[in-house]
Image (cartoon, rainbow, N blue to C red):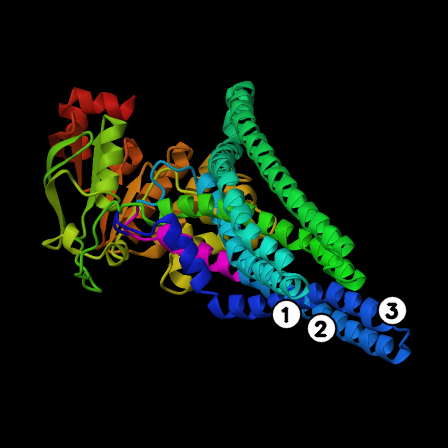
Amino acid sequence: MPTGGPTGGLVLRRAIRGQRRRVIAASLLGMTHQGCEALVPVVIGAAIDTAVATGSSEQLLRLLLVLAVLFLVLSTCYRTSARITEGTGEIAAHRLRLDLAARVLDPRGGADADRLPGALTSIATNDARRVGSVATVISYGVSAVAALVISAVALLDISVPLGLLVLLGIPPLLWLGHRISRPLERRSETEQERAAHASGVAADLVSGLRVLKGMGAESAAVARYRTTSQDSLAAALRAARSRAGHEGAVLALTGVFIAVIAVVGAYLAMDGSISVGDLVAAVGLAQFLLGPFQLLTYVNAELAQGRASARRIAEVLAAPVTVEAGHEVPADRAAGQLALRGVTLGALRGVDLDLPAGSLTGIVAQDPAAARDLLVCLAREADPAEGAIELDGTPLTSLDPDALRRVVLVAHHDADLFESTLLDNVRAGADGGTTSVERALRASAADDVARLLPDGGDTLLAERGRSLSGGQRQRVALARALAADRPVLVLHDPTTAVDTVTESRIAARLREIRRDRTTVLVTTSPALLAVTDRVVVLEDGAVRAAGHHTELLAADAAYRAAVLA
């Protein structure tokens, strides 16, 4: 999505516009409810003047029947409106989560830049919920304003001064309430940012818990999270204090305003300008007005927090893409010939490299950063700063990223497993039937892993595969990459945690299963490099040597040290 993407205001408008019909229906029901509730003290005042004062039982029964109808209507409208408004907020939040998911999964990338996975999760849950709440409270706000207008009209009918007092006093009160909500909006945004960061750190620590325990680094991890959590708590407390101050200030203002209405009404009654029934109606309306004002206070607070969350969502949706989308699509049966021409990115410095179709090539990078940058380029997670990469003679920049990744699969060393069964993990990228899965399991020696599990391949891999050993996880991840059967497969250190005997078995089977398919092994494993057609050595970000594994071992001391160390 381009840099000029949606703003926070646009996100809010989309959330409301997408639920326009539901918001209108809920607003009409809410207005009816509030109108009936405002008419209750008016009817009671009329009963005092026309029935109680005159002693007319018939008139009293008629007005009591009117009250019963009012209560029936307002009760029904309230229940129906509440159901619609809550559903409106949930649907709006759900659609926002879908938009966020689509942006995060966009093959052009960029949404997760400088954001921990836990922070994105917080934005897709807490922030989406708060923006969804805006769609919910719009109808509340409309209902509250309708209640104020109906009350003002009723008071005008009772007494022009009372009606004018309400009509002229409401706008300044609403303006003051909006001004008072500004600090809450700022602090709510900070609160959500700190909470998202704390969630990200927590998810990071939990995912690496076993590693931390193995290193004895629990205390450092706890200290890091404690600091992050305390920052989040402090921001939450500041936001809570701001909300309490906001609600208290608005409540005080409305209390004073309602007291003024009651005092003016009492003065007019003593002066004989209005009747006792009118006074009861005026006092009842003044007390009723407290509800709409409180509702407006709640709406104002929700809008302030919703605006802050909408800006955070807009930042993700408007995040610049990492790579631009091409429009060409690779052939279904791509040959898989890769060519790098003067590729420069990060630690890579003018890399020239030809990877023939159907070849099995090993790449030894003495600098881990160079290996990482090479993988990033081949996966098109970033485009080279200089130079170009071609697939079957077509620059990668001309290809659609999603279509490209259906041809070129880059399996990173730190690939995660899913919280699912072993077989489901392997089938995740498979286009074929069970045969390709079975072959992949055997080639990666993951079939041995399945045999050791209680339910075989149907065993649930808990903790995203962390119930397995490091070597077992690597074999399952390798099986998943092989089962995908892409024309081009790039593997980064797929066997670093596997024992030597199993690694040799995998190396032999890997060559067989990838016959006539382009395969690149970015590794320093001698067992894997021994089965390659050719090994390319990267040093200082450029190609320093190339040849067969045995030749390089015999003639290149630096290669021998890197591979046999």
Of marks 3 and 2, the one in the foreground? 3
In the rendered structure, which disc, 3 or 2, sits on the residue that comes first in sequence? Answer: 3
Q: Secondary structure at mark 2?
A: helix
In the rendered structure, which disc, 1 or 3, sits on the residue that comes first in sequence? Answer: 1
Q: Which residue is mark 1?
A: 32
- Disc ID at residue 254: none
The reply to whether discs 1 and 3 touch (Cβ–Cβ < 8 Å) is no
Task: Give the percent coordinates (x, y) of residue 481.
Answer: 35, 50
Task: Give the percent coordinates (x, y) of residue 482.
Answer: 34, 51
Task: Give the percent coordinates (x, y) of residue 204.
Answer: 48, 34
Q: Which residue is mark 3?
A: 53
Task: Give the percent coordinates (x, y) of residue 65.
Answer: 81, 77
Q: Secondary structure at mark 3?
A: loop
Q: Which residue is mark 2?
A: 73
Where 189 falls versus 45 (above or below)?
above
Count neighbours of disc 3 (C-alpha within 10 A) and say few if under 14, some if 14 to 19, many if 20 or more. few
Please give the name of the residue rendered at 41% of the width and 58% of the height, measured from the top-left corner: 13
Distance of mark 2 from mark 1, alpha carbons?
8 Å
Count neighbours of disc 2 (C-alpha within 10 A) and say few if under 14, some if 14 to 19, many if 20 or more. some
Please give the name of the residue rendered at 53% of the width and 22% of the height, measured from the top-left corner: 227
Which amino acid does the dot numbered 2 rest on? Val
Q: Is residue 162 left or right of residue 458?
A: right
Distance of mark 3 from mark 2, alpha carbons?
28 Å
Which amino acid does the dot numbered 3 rest on? Ala
Pick whichever, 523 or 280, lies toward us. 280
